[in-house]
Image (cartoon, helix red, strand yellow):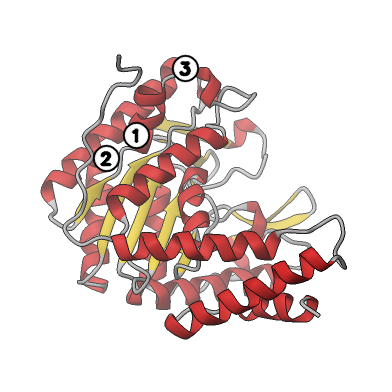
Amino acid sequence: MDFMVDIQIRPPVEKIGYQHNIMVVGSCFTEHIGGRLANLKFPVVQNPNGILFDPLSVCRSLASYIAAKQYKAEELIELNGLWQSWQHHSKYSGLNVQEVLDKINQSQQAAHKFLKQSDWLIITLGSAFFYRLAATGEPVANCHRAPAQSFIKHLTEIDEIITSMDGCIRQVFTFNPGLKIILTISPVRHIREGLVENNRSKSRLIEAVHQLVEKYESVYYFPAYELVIDVLRDYRFFDIDLVHPNYAATEFVYEKFVEYFIEKDASRLMVEIKDILNAYRHRPLHATSGAHTNFLKAYLKKTQQFQQKNPQFDFTQELKYFSRNAV
C-alpha cells in the first residue's frame, strides 16, 4: 500500500559537485538547503542581502550584485533607533550609519565577485506579495516592523513576475554565461496575508517559474513546495506555528535535493565529511576519559587521511580540536 503520492523530479544534466561555487538567494527556506551544503564544506554564499521573499526584490538584489552597487548614507533610514536599509534584512541594521554601510557594501563586493565565479544559482521564492513605500513608491524588500500604513501592498501578476525574472535571468547569464539556475518555491505558508491569499500568491509564483524553466535550458525546477504540501501533506510535518516545515520535513526535502541534484561522488564525500563534523561537535560527559581520548585519536587519524586524499577541503578547526584533546 502506498502512503505517499509519488513525484517526478527532473534532474539537471550536470549535477552539483564540490568543485562548483553555489550562490543561494531568496526566502528563509533557501537557507535550509544552502546552510546544509555550506556546513558540509561546499563553497556557498547565502543571501548577500539577507532573506528576500518576493521575486521583484530577488531580481533587484541580483542586479545590484552584477553592477557591484555601493550604497550611500542617504539610502539608509533611521527607524526604531537603528540605521536600516529597505533592501536588506535587519541583520545588517545597526547603531552606527558608517558601520551599517560598510557591512552592506562589503557584502555587495563579495557577492559581485562570487556571482561572477558561480556555477549554480539557487533561487527560492516565498511570496508574490510586494511592498512599496506609501510616501515615495520606493520598493521595499524588508519592512523592519514599520507601521503597516507606511506601505502599499501589491499582489504581483504572473506577467509581472515573468517579465521581471526573465530580464533578471538574461542579465545574470550575460554576466556569467556558464551559470546554471535552480528555481524553487518555499513551502512556508505566509498566513499573515491569509490562507486564500497565500494560495493565490504561491500559484502565481509556480506558474511563472514553470514558464521560465520551459524557456531556458540552463534553468531547472526543484519541487520543494510540492514535496512538503503534496507528498508529505500532513500538519505533523510543520512546526508548532503550523507555518514552517519542521526538521523532519526539511530533512526529507534536503535528501531529495541531494538525490536528484548532487553528483554521486560528492554525495559519498558528504557522508564522510558529515561523520567527521559530527565527531568534532560531539561533547562528552567525561572529556578526560580514556575512551574519549581514543575516540579523538581515531578521528584525528581519519581526518588527516581524508584531507590527504582531498586537499581541497579545509579541516583546520577540526584537526586542531582532535589533536589538542587527543593527549
209 is higher (above) or lower (below) than 321: above
Instruction: Report x, y in % for residue 260.
Output: 28, 49
Q: Residue at x 38, y 62 (%)?
A: 268
Q: Can residue 321 be seen at all in this image of the molecule?
A: yes
Badge 3 element: helix
Q: Which residue lies under the disc numbered 1?
A: 156
Instruction: Report x, y in % for residue 60.
Output: 39, 56
Q: Earlier in the sequence, mark 1 or mark 3?
A: 1
Name the amino acid, label 2. Answer: Glu
145 is higher (above) or lower (below) than 98: above
Q: Quadrant of the C terminus?
A: bottom right
Name the amino acid, label 1. Answer: Thr
Few, some or many residues within 10 Å of mark 3 (<14, 14–19, 20+): few
40 is higher (above) or lower (below) than 81: below
Q: Are marks 2 and 1 in contact (CB under 8 Å)?
A: yes
Name the amino acid, label 3. Answer: Leu
Q: Which residue lies under the disc numbered 2?
A: 160
Few, some or many residues within 10 Å of mark 1 (<14, 14–19, 20+): some
Q: Is residue 212 left or right of residue 118?
A: left
Q: Is residue 43 left or right of residue 304?
A: left
Q: Nearer the viewer, mark 2 or mark 3?
A: 3
Q: Earlier in the sequence, mark 2 or mark 3?
A: 2
Q: Residue at x 60, y 37 (%)?
A: 150
Q: Nearer the viewer, mark 1 or mark 3?
A: 3
Q: Residue at x 85, y 64 (%)?
A: 287
Residue 109 or residue 249, whichever sits in front: 249
Instruction: Report x, y in % for residue 154.
Output: 42, 32
Badge 1 element: loop
Which label belongs to residue 195?
Answer: 3
Residue 1 or residue 178, whichever sits in front: 1
Q: Is residue 270 left or right of residue 74?
A: left
Q: Residue at x 50, y 68 (%)?
A: 41
